[in-house]
Image (cartoon, coloured by chain):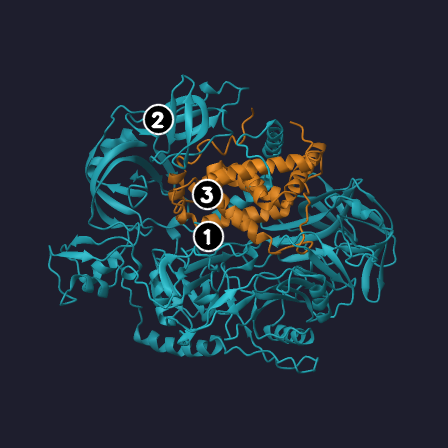
Amino acid sequence: MTEPLTNKPDQEDTEIAKKLQAVAERTQAPSYFVVELEQRLREKHIPKGSWHWQWRDLTPTLGWMVLVLAIGILLIWGIRNFVPTPQPASDGTSTALEPTDTPTVTVVSDDNVTPAPETQGYDWRNAKLYLSVPLPGSPVGTNLYVPQEEQPATIETARALATQFGIAGNIYETSQGLFNATGYLVTDGRQRLYMQSNLHYDYYSDYGAYTYTSGDKNITDQQAAIAIETFMESHGLDLPYQIQSARRDPGMYFVLPLTPDGFTIWHDYNIPARLEFTIDQNQQVIRVTSYQVGYEAFGGTYGIRTAEEAFQQVLDQSHTIHDGVLESIRSGGLSQAGFWSRTYPDNKTITIIGQPATYPASNKDTLPFASIGQWTVFGNVTGLENVDPTTYVEATGRFVTENGIHKFNVDSWKVTSAEEFYLSGTLRREGDQTILTVEDGSAEYTIEDAPEDLPLKTTLPDEYLTIYGFMNEGKLDWYSIQYYPSGSGGGGGGGSGNGFYQLNLSGTPVPFPIEQFTQGNTEYIVSENDTLSSIAENFGVTLDQLVAANNLPDADHVLTGQRLIIPGLQQNQPVIGQHIKVERGIFTITTHRKTDGSQRVEYALYLNPELYPFLYAILEGSNLEDLQGYHNRPVDIWGTIESVDQNGTPIVNVERYEIPFPNLDFQLMEGTQRMTQLNGQQFTLFTASEGTTYAQITSIGIPDSTILGLEGNDVILEVLAVPGETFGGYPALRVFSGETVNPMENQSTDLTITANQPHVMDEAPGMEEYTPTSATIEKVELVYYGPDPLYGNQNGNADGTPQYIQPAWRFYGHYSNGDEFEFLVQALKQEFLLPELAPYRRPG
Amino acid sequence: MTTLFTEQTDSPRMDEIQLAREAISNVDAFAELYRRHVTRVYRYHIVHTGNLKDAEDLTSQTFIAALEGIRSFRGNGSFAAWIMGIASRKKLMYFRGRRPEFPLDEAVGYPSPSLPTDKAAVQRLQIEAVSRALRQISPERAEAISLSFFGGLSNSEISRVLKKSEAAIKMLVSRGLQDLRERTSQELEVEL
């Protein structure tokens, strides 16, 4: 490619840029959506009080009675929930196709467990962590696997897989799929197989666009197991597997393929390598979507740590995130509570509307595959392939069913001006008519062919009834109706953890810094009332480490004034008792107004995280009231870290302060911004209208690289010009806020300085009743963890080796608020690890 | 030149470090961050999916994930970059076929929530046109452009999200614009 390298976009590119910007500017999220989401977020927000961190006894609290009860319950739970030895499905030689009465594969259920409240509880994250199953034993070693790049489907492999699924039909080429390679669709008009590769495909026994909603939400695990087993056998899916129910869509189960040594494979966010089965009310499998992983054995046996050691790491995750553990959380239940899809009778002339899709057949003599909306069409469809697939067409004709295949025979079609839309509102019945009143009361529509079981008189915002359809010449033509009671709707999730360590397969162990800690040692002077255990707990080290680091003869005996070496600390861990001096931290004053009318003033200091191990500290001291006028101004502070709150924020007792610039105040400056760079670091330059150019830094002193609007726009910034501060050869401005200037209005008179005014925060009602959510681990199992192939193999190691599929201990359970969580703990013994994290992407 | 994100960039980043810390324990602080960034997240998702329902779903998922993980925002980059990073990852998960109308394909449709007026129809057509156009250039370039124009991120913020150098981002955006111009300009008939 010989494209010229340009740094400046030429004129026409600027045109395109302006167009994009114009479209973007005019796009706003619907206001009902913004409001409703804010409401949901508020409800989800788990308030945390700001009490100080208490000394905590880490031993589980059990009374004798509870102990007996707990053992009894553990025995019962153990029998019910302990993961059974994986049983492979039939070996493929059986020819029986009738469902057997008892499935040979049992369903391993993730979420039918109600934790017994009296089982062993560990103090954890200011609440309790319960382990409701016994920790399993473990093999001495496991395999390692190497992910294999999957081969995109070809006509031959598509035909072979289709034959395996019993589809005798035509093959069509679909547009670029997930891997930018041609995908294939094989269909006989009723069954459809969309295939990207042998590992990624989507099969429908009777295609419907809303099949994912048609699963039976009342199906039992046993019925599902029978349906799945029958299907696997009759469709040649000969692989060892385990079945697990999936909560996301009704009637959905996961079939988890097993590695040769009998374990399941997991990716991030609690997602396994799997085949997703959807089963309907007739206990038929109506959809199978394959998300499998290709791999080959690396060879060798690799020692792993026990479940107990892994569990200890989960306990250590209580307040600080450690390496070698991945955590994910997911909330939200079923996707929706009610769904109806429009169906039409056969042999009646009607008009359907939808977006056209045509795929050429691989055999040039065969007509292309055509669909309009969710329906397969044939007949007078010439020219449909030339229509832009994002426009809508309407087709007049009749539905017919031939050989069990339901499709639409087109008499004529045309591009339509019908508008697709959706409406939310309430339904009512008048006689035999169903009428929709739109949410804001502005209109009413008749719903033709309304299903009988639609919910009537639903009320917002607790219940959302939404109709999707087309408006054609004033008439409402619906195609789907969805019902969401409050609390359902798309769930969300998150994750934390820094990822796993890189593997060391050289055969020579590499020493780790003491117990994963990465900083040097620190000294601590023992004060009155300290004990070795309390000191160890305070610094997040174990008693053994402390004793070892100090060669103490007696683990119980320390003297006041004695100097102890604290072995290397977790990064960013503030040290209690440490004296600190902060130069030019940004001092802030926040008044917290409580619901009972009282208020509390909090003083805090924001620090440059590049210079200090923490970003933020809470200040205490009687002399702080003197600093009332210095909100958001730089202050020098001398003090001692007294304690750490449960968010990890240090609380500093201020012994002395100094105000370096007593008269420093905010200014409003007008000018323009542009980007520049120094030594590879980008930052923003601000040129004031009077001519001086400044480097922008943030309130806490980090080089700033934000631009308001586009480079060159007129902006007004609210700044602190701290005397003597420079960056990159320019005088520096600490920028606190800013706005772009609209030349239509004279804005300079409207803006006022607000950054010097202390914050006022009103405490949300209900904080006082907060109860911490406890967590219950319901399943502990050894699994393999590997990268998700849908992301491509982007997480390779620096030396070019891929991320291996490696053993991990999986802890799965629920918080008491219903959110599900998962911890994956790297299981390989340290001798097979490098003290370096593997490259990894996660939020945060 | 008209302003791009008036409400959202009143105080870009500067006091967001403070807000994010307060958001751990105070729901109003989180709500403030939400209000400042919901539009950029939504715009990013809708230009990518071309579909209102999916854009709403992805926007919800993005903010719920941000709420769960708010503690991990350390202020060593802008909040906008942080939340767009989450949005970008949520978008990747969307294409696993969670809710396809046309499995393993992409449906582009943008119903407007009320009786369509001319203005709403034009708006919809424009977003569809952009969405379509972006599909015709390389995904990397489309992503850089989406983050820039619709997510409203600076090049340095995009480099944080995509983990590439800023020079690479600049290249992706400018080459992407070039591609858009060469391949699709007749579709992007937008009134300026």
Nearer the N terminus, badge 1 or badge 2? 2
Badge 3 and badge 2 in a common chain: no
Which chain is the one coloured orange? B
Residue assigned mark 2: A730
**Which amino acid type is shown beneath numbered disc 1?**
Arg
Q: Chain of mark 3?
A: B
Residue A728: image location, x then y, percent: 35, 30
Q: Nearer the viewer, residue B138 or A110?
A: B138
Residue drawn at x 70%, y 80% is A98
Q: Secondary structure at mark 2?
A: strand
Residue assigned mark 1: A842
Badge 3 and badge 1 in a common chain: no
Q: Is residue A553 left or right of residue A444?
A: left
**Which amino acid type is shown beneath numbered disc 3?**
Arg
Q: Quadrant of residue A487?
A: bottom right
**Which amino acid type is shown beneath numbered disc 2?**
Tyr
Q: Quadrant of the N terminus of chain A?
A: top right
Q: Secondary structure at mark 3?
A: helix
Q: Chain of mark 2?
A: A
Q: Is residue A161 left or right of residue A4?
A: right
Residue drawn at x 51%, y 70% is A264
Residue assigned mark 3: B160
Look at the image and give the colour of chain A: cyan
